Image (cartoon, helix red, strand yellow):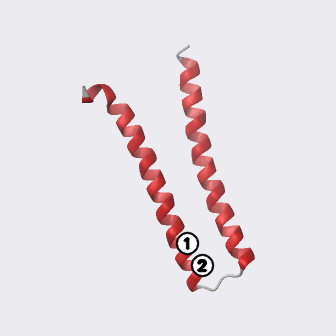
């Protein structure tokens, strides 16, 4: 039974890894910004870049799911 769902488990694990990676990147960026006394504008730019990076990965995943589901129809 586990062999049937191996690909799905790997996909979920990969997305979980991406989520953990972005969380750790966010925590490290927050620490660097606090210790460096970065101005508010600079902080906003850094967080916007991180946010759009996350949105890119989420969009990629959604596009892949839609693309695969339309090929099987």
Name the disc covering residue 33, or none. Answer: 2
Question: Which residue does the image show at 54% across and 25% down from the upper left?
Answer: 68
Identify the element where label 2 is drawn. helix
- Determine the residue located farthest toward the right in the rendered image: 41
Identify the element where label 1 is drawn. helix
Question: Which residue does the image show at 65% across and 66% down from the upper left?
Answer: 47
Image quadrant for the C terminus? top right
**Which residue is disc 1 drawn over?**
29
Above or below, comparing residue 72 to residue 37 in the picture:
above
Question: Which residue does the image show at 58% across and 45% down from the upper left?
Answer: 58
In the picture provided, is 7 more to the left or to the right than 25?
left
What is the spatial separation of the Cα atoms under label 2 and label 1, in whole angstroms? 6 Å
10 Å neighbourhood of mark 2: few (<14), some, or many (≥20)? some
Which quadrant of the structure image shows residue 45? bottom right
Which quadrant of the structure image shows residue 6? top left
Q: Do tag 2 and tag 1 residues touch (Cβ < 8 Å)?
A: yes
């Amino acid at each position: 039974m586990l062999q049937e769902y191996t690909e799905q488990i790997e996909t979920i694990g990969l997305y979980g890894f991406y989520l953990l990676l972005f969380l750790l990147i966010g925590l490290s960026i927050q620490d660097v910004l606090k210790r460096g006394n970065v101005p508010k504008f600079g902080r906003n730019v850094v967080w916007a870049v991180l946010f759009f990076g996350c949105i890119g990965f989420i969009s990629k995943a959604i596009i892949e799911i839609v693309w695969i589901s339309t090929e099987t129809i």
